[in-house]
Amino acid sequence: MNSPLAGSGTLLRFALRRDRVLIPVWVAVNALMVLSMPNTLKTLYGTPAQRADLLHQMATNTSLRAMVGPVFGDSLGALTAWRVGVYAGALAAVTSLLVVVRHTRDEEESGRQELVSSGTVGRRAPLTAALLTAAVANAALCVLVVAGLAGQGASGALAFGLGVAGVGMVFATTAAVAAQLTESARLARGLTAAVLGAAFVLRAAGDSARDDGSSVLTWLSPLGWLENLRPYAGERWWVLPLFAAAAALQALLAYALAGRRDIGMSFLPTRPGPAAGRLGTAGALAWRLQRGSLFGWSTGFFLAGVVYGGMTDGAARLVGDNTKAREIFQRMGGQSGLTDAFLAAMVGMLGLIAALYAVSSVLRLSGEETSGRAEPVLAAAVGRLRWAAGHLIIAFGGSALLMLLAGLGFAVGYGRQIGPVLGACLLQVAAVWVIGGVTVLLFGVLPRGAVAAWGVAGAVLLIGWIGPALNVPRAVLDLSPFGHLPKLPGGGMEWGPVGVLLGVAGVLVGVGLAGVRRRDLSG
């Protein structure tokens, strides 16, 4: 009788090979975001007076504290942990959930796991390989963070690196449990993302109420544990066992569930469909498959717009007379007044995130193809272009909807400049569509390399987030389609670059669809 873990090593090597693009890109983006921060903060808050003023502002500014958490020290290391800790932990969580679901429920849903399990593979080997793959990704991130921040203090760097990796592993095991409970990879990702969103909201509510991280709501969130670890501010090493305990308990639950179900089955029953089919077109099927994801993203973008709008005045007060901070916001949002520059910068950040939705939505085509579900659809009176068009309408139209809702959120949160801010949000769609077009091109021409679209999106995200803070050359910023958009609100409108971006997106989509039409299916 095979051991339940038989074949785990082989599956781990296979998973690392499959994720040889996804993991390095996302780990690099996260590490660079963290490691670029000390020099930026040294430029912004180089004097004790500036740092003292920052600590005072954060103690009294509840909206900003809800976004990034409280400050526990005035050293560069402590400020780095404050400024990027929440977001580095959240990004590690997203990477982990994607990896675990990809190598568990995705494999079962596609039917590949049944084929693999027919060999000498233990019942719990796939889950073990998935968790070990996530552990490798989080360990690599931890090593990079510790090595990069060691110059600010080895103890604080170790605490911060372990804390970020700990958040990643907590949500890796959350995803493992969700993958056992649900029959759909899409639902498993959605449930884990919902838990992550709840963790962010709990931490934000707790930090808004208390400026020392002591709120019960903060302690209910793994992201709150990370900030209460207090790297570079009198490290609380006793917080680390919380990550280990949560990850271990969830892993044990996932293993117990994995041993009590058949491959492809789940514990949450799938609602049966109607006796007579109600989906008469390929577009209706695409909408049925993607509507849950679009609803979740839409809710998140509207709430993000409300939050960013509400913190606009507070951000302007925080920057105050800090020339360097003003310059960074102006590089991100244009050379207009500080409030307009902040609004433009936040709108640009949401545009970068909307590009991730476009990539994930377009790649749904790849998932349908490789799982074999596209073949029976195309066997009917449905052409390839018509099948692809259903998903692309949701991907491109959905990204426009996200930015529209973000603009409405800004209107609710800020209450001023409604027209200009809404227009600025919709302007981001042109650049988002270019990233979506690249994804269509890769799917159509290089279907096995379509996952590289995540690398493109990650690189664009890195340029947009870190480039302005590091004052990188203009030629580097221009590598991103977002670098060619007018900086609104506050700047002058230029329709030429917008038209060029839309034209490029159209060409990319056209070439990609031509490839879809000519090549063989790879299911």
Image (cartoon, helix red, strand yellow):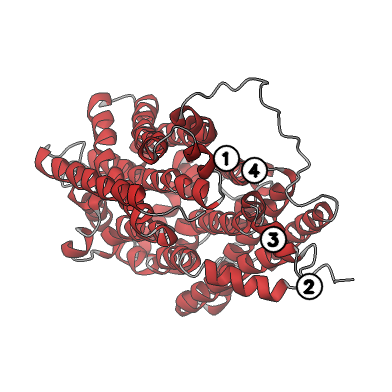
Q: Are marks 2 and 4 in contact (CB under 8 Å)?
A: no
- For the residue carrying disc 3, how many other residues have a C-alpha within 10 Å: few (<14), some (14-19), or many (20+)? few
Report if residue 319 is visible in the image.
no
What amino acid is at disc 2? Answer: Ala
Q: Nearer the viewer, mark 3 or mark 1?
A: 3
- Secondary structure under tag 3 reads helix
Badge 1 amino acid: Val
Where's residue 463, x and y in %?
A: 30, 60
Residue at 44% x, 30% y is: 283
Number of the label disc, if any, that sits on residue 6:
2
Which of the two discs, 2 and 3, labels the residue nearer the N terminus? 2
The residues tagged by marks 3 and 1 sit, at their Cα atoms, a distance apart of 41 Å
Residue 135 occupies quadrant: bottom right
Residue 103 place in picture, x, y as percent: 63, 59
Q: Which residue is tagged 3?
A: 115
Q: Nearer the viewer, residue 134 or 363?
A: 363
**Residue at 58% from the left image edge and 67% from the top image edge:** 138
